[in-house]
Amino acid sequence: MAEQEKLTPHSTASGAVSRRNFLGALAAAGAVAAFEQLAANPQAVLAAYEEQIVQGTLGQGRSSADLKALDVLERMRLELLRALQKPASERRWVMVIDLRKCIGCHACTIGCVAENKLPPGVVYRPVIEEEFGTYPNVARRFIPRPCMQCENPPCVPVCPVNATYTNAEGIVEMDYERCIGCRYCLTACPYSARVSDFGFTYTEELPVIQGLLGTATADDYERAPNFEYGKQYARQGRASPVGNARKCHFCQHRILEGVLPACVTTCIGRATFFGDANDPESLVAELIARPNVLRLREELGTEPRVYYLK
Amino acid sequence: MSDKPLLPEPERSETCALSRRDFLKLSAATGGAAALLGSLPAFDQLLAAQRQALSGNSPLSAPERQIYTVCLQCNTGCGIKVKIWEGIASKIEGNPYSPWTLHPHLPYSTPVAEAGSIEGGLCPKGQAGLQTAYDPYRIVSVLKRRPGTKRGEGQWVTISFEQALDEIINGGDLFGEGPVEGLKDVYALRDAKVAKAMSDFVKRIVDEKDAEKKRALVEEFKATFAADLDKLIDPDHPDLGPKNNQFAFIWGRLKNGRGDLVRRFVLSGLGSINANGHTTVCQGSLYFAGKALSEQWDGSKFTGGQKFYWQADLKNSRFVIFIGANMFEANYGPPLRVTPITEGAVDRGLRYVVVDPRFSKVASKAWKWIPIKPGEDSALGLGMMRWMFENDRINKRFLSAANKAAANAIGEASWTDAVWLVHIKNGKPDKLVRALELGLVTRQTEQDKDGKEVTVYVTEDGVKFKFDPFVALVDGKPTPVDPNSTELPVYGDLFVDTTLQNAKGETITVKSGLQIIRESAFEKTIEEYAAIADIQPSDIIELAREFTSYGTQAVIDIHRGASQHTNGFYTSFIFFTLNALIGNFDHKGGLSKPTTYDRLGSRAKGPFDLAKMNNGANVPFGLDILRTTISYEKSTIFNGYPAKRPWFPLATDVYQEDLPSIGDAYPYPVKIAMFYMSAINYALPAGHTTIEVLADPKKLPLIIASDIFVGETSMYADYIFPDLSYLERWEFHGTHPSVTYKVENVRNPAISLPGWPMVKVYGQEIPLSFEALVLGIAERLNLPGFGPNGLGEGVPFIYPEDYYLRMVANLAFGEKEDGSNSVPEADDREVEIFLKARAHLPKQVFDPVRWKAILGNDEKLWRQTIYVLNRGGRWQDEGKDYKGDLLSNAYAKQINLYQEKTAKTINSMTGEPFAGYPRYYPPHLSSTGKPIEDGDEYAFTLITYKEITMTKARTISNYWLLAVMPENTLLMNVADAQRLGLRNGDLVRISSASNPRGVWDLRNGSEVPMVGRLKVVQGIRPGVVAFGLGWGHWASGARDIVIDGQTVKGDVRRLAGFHANAAMRTDPVLQDVTLTDIAGGSAVFYSTKVKVEKA
């Protein structure tokens, strides 16, 4: 089994705070009058906390801050925390990609590879480059292409073993344990957003020789587990996800931790946006109502949850 | 919609994560005790709880699994956080405290416990850095060239660290090629007192102008130091300095911390003057134009010019012209500078122009792309300048301010000398006019407050100056100017072209600096300038009009494309002059300069005043091999014009001159060279010419390299000492001009590779590293500044942290002597995070007990130091970088638009003085200033650029990046390709007049052809071809080598692409070096004419 037992959050290995430690920390800390009233009333505490989120002042050390003064990454992170207060079924995750801000740097491509420990041949988020026009009137366009997380995903019904499905938040997931690697879903996806993991690593067949670091150590980072779907998949032998279909999952394991998807945080042009479209105050809700919004291959009726701004 | 619940939720109850409901219950349960939130901020605590409730899905978000440090995948130096899983660097993100990756960055006071799930943006190279650290081709033993084999043959033996040190220090018949001198032989002059006395005497010799007297002084020198003459390179030329100078340290990418170590080792340790950097291969002429622009009058001379330049404060600019600045793919650098451009252009109405022959990614988003003829940027600049003068679109208020008092009175921080008067001799601008010669002041003597006799210059009205002041016309009246006066503002007449009577009654012709600049701009018409640059006159006018339409929120930001030409110094000068004409220096949205916190503890005189912490220091003196420290005319080896090789009185660190100078033994032979993080032959234009010297032990008897693998240059070394990667070591990365905040970025060890070798120096174990190499040599040669008393009596320098941790403490303490500028102390939680995050590091790398002892077991300072390390640096908070419309970290000094110092400097290749004002020079000239004609056969101009996935020599090991872009291509315009019958994807050979076969000759019968794949595009100027740097390796794991008889197979992925630097034009006079800007030192990348033919 590639899926290892899920670690206790912030487990002892790194010494992070366990629940018990957290209680201990609460108990051990000295009292400060100013917080007593708040703390005595947990409801009020949470309300105030949410207020801070809404105001964009949470953890910012700001007395008052305009959300717009924050890096959009910070605004979206705070909105993410707000969304996570709601039941999963009430959230509607969408991604918005502003092509005017995409500079074709591939930071998202590599960020995704690094986050999900993707092997050679497996890319969840390529960026397509195009050139138009005639010198000197030339244009270049860069189009990142994650999984569209379709509302009507053509990849799901074709799976013979129900290894792929849409979860409560609308993310099309893979169950690596069920997947038999038949690749029907790869064929069915009109966006070519699915790929097969053939089990390669970047460092295989490289030298192991006295005097050099060698592959034994050099592949450590590749073998370390990823955390897809909240589990741990270390890359070992033929175990899952080797042999499976793989795809973008909006970094669900990060989202649930209050961290934006890797392609969003790493975007140096700030071209990629993520959030809960059901939250009318959210940045993504604002963006998908813009007149220059579009989705890829609307005519197929797949209803993508990925929007582009042109 | 859902046929399965959200995965992690059911697992939560088992994994102690809290749902919101749980959290409420928990809070209720803790009830009265909730009071217990304590000294931690309530909301931070709650946020932590909230995160707790969500955690388990992505354990790397725990702050205990993260170390904040600094990237070095390129020189931008973005703050990063390294996420660590069981001791392995698992992922790299942007550090949100760093203004490089989050805009604005987190407040510095944000608890590090909270920042675990906050990430800034990071470019693909930054993320792929794991593969630089975990590179199978990294060396873990000292490698020695196998005796009996030639340099560069790729035959190595592993030897112990101790044996390697013994051999490089003691020398001997190391390779069966006869005796080789070791470091002990070159470390000849060891007595600092003698060195100081010699150094002082040499100053007298070089300052003596009379040839006869100079010779006499040399004889006197020889008599005075008769006992020590054997320690000199040549007693007949004492100004060459001691034999110690025959050790040359040559670095590629060196950052502070290690840079301080190098200076301590080479200069004050070994007493060699040759600690030589690589500036001119980057943007030398831009740096040295900055130096000339920033020289300040100290009362007797112009001095203290900073090797630096200015960049745009993009986040507040409204109009920007980027000249040869590849903002989205390279420059300094993507995470730092892309965001304000993309967001500015889409959300803030930023309008920008890209001037570049290639349609770069940044050009693709620009308001306007100007595909200029390579090297002719200055024609565009002067055309704009002419239009601005003609249309009266200059900032007269700013330009009229002749000194500090005047600038400050009108709300400016900086000022220019634009209105100062300049002598015109034989029609040419010469010296600055002084008040005494005009009789505006009289020279008098008086006693200063200590009773010492001093000369003062006094006006009729009794105003006193400590020096003979400069002069400006004020409403036509000559008026003395003290540039640094805060009391006597002078606002001068802008355009002066007149004659004056001097005190002797002679008529002299004078002009204001601005008049000289105006005349320079008027040398050609806008149409003529447009024709030179092959652009439209309307482009020039449109740019000039826009540039002058946004007040001081318009700016021209220049980089390598402007500076890496033979006219780079003057092109840079022109564009900074344009910026000055609108007065945008120090303004929000205008030009910004770099500002860092003081790691050396000099400003606060502590807690560790490291420059002074030394148990005796050697005194290096004499001429450096690049000929930058003494001017040609003053040296005893002056022999008329042209000099044998150029001298660089206005520049330093002229990288392309290191090896040719060594090869020519000019000014003297070098016995031992140590290369640090250098791929000099790969990085330089015409770098192939250096291989002749590298490969020849007769020209360079001993080469020592510090490298992480067997690289393009280190493959020619006799010894390679393995180094740590940037994720395993210390450095202080500093900043860039565009960063408006005061900052310092601290690179500190995030990982240690399993089984990494530890070696003993001064009896203690430290990781095999560059520091180990330096400390090992220092120990064996007993160098001052190192060892048990290296930092002063009883203060050891035996661990790297003895030095570096004190620097961090200095940053933490701040720059006020009373400590009022210090950072907060880490609280218990922060200390806990600090320790746990580093629990995977071996004791030799991280030892909190030893570290705390280094700081004198000062609990407060220790916690402050932890506070800095926990964040990976120190940064001023957002908002503190402005005071009204001005930058808080303002340059606030004089900008020399007319440069007397430059005008008085002689070009060693022509014997003519340099021009002291911005003027047009064509590109592509020889070292003696002659045009180069290579014939119609070489029809294309070759330029280079960087793809965002590559950084010259050091990212070829990053397989993730190679997956995105496996190889580079030669970009050619569709029209050119059609004309030549070439098609997209064709393999083509690139050759030039100085490399007609189009090959890299690696010696030992090995050649690499310059053959690459063609990419036919619309987005490049016809007649220009371009390639991205970073591919086409012949070492660094690309080709087979042999270690201890075993073949290490090269990896074809690392062999991919091509490298066409060897096609770049050699200087027709010198023949063994690239074209060079003799003023600013730049190596020329963008003007070679090449032939492109189907391979």
Image (cartoon, coloured by chain):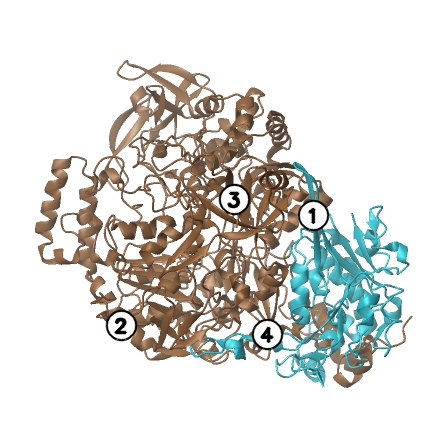
User: Which of the two labelled residues, at mark 2 and mark 3, occupies the earlier sequence position?
Assistant: 2
What residue is rendered at 51% in x and 39% in y? B940
Residue A252 is situated, as x and y percent measured from the top left of the image, at: 76, 70
Q: Amino acid at mark 4?
A: Tyr
Closer to the eye: label 3 or 4: 3
> Where does label 3 land, which residue?
B1092
Q: Secondary structure at mark 4?
A: helix
* Whole-number angstrom distance, CA of label 2 to CA of label 3: 47 Å
Where residue A193 sits in the image (x, y, percent)?
77, 64
Q: Amino acid at mark 1?
A: Glu
**Residue receiving disc 1:** B343
Q: Secondary structure at mark 2?
A: helix
The kind of residue tagged 2 is Glu
- Look at discs 2 and 1 and give the one toward the viewer: 2
- Say which colour chain B has: brown
Labels 2, 3: front one: 3
Are the residues flagged by discs 3 and 4 in contact, CB closer than 8 Å?
no
Q: Nearer the viewer, residue B106 or B441?
A: B106
**Circle 4 Cα neighbour tier, 10 Å, few/some/many (<14 / 14–19 / ≥20):** many
The colour with which the image depicts chain A is: cyan
Specify the subunit that label 4 lies on. A
Answer with the quarter of the image where residue A243 lies: bottom right
- The answer to whether the residue labelled 4 contacts the one labelled 1, judged by CB atoms less than 8 Å apart, is no
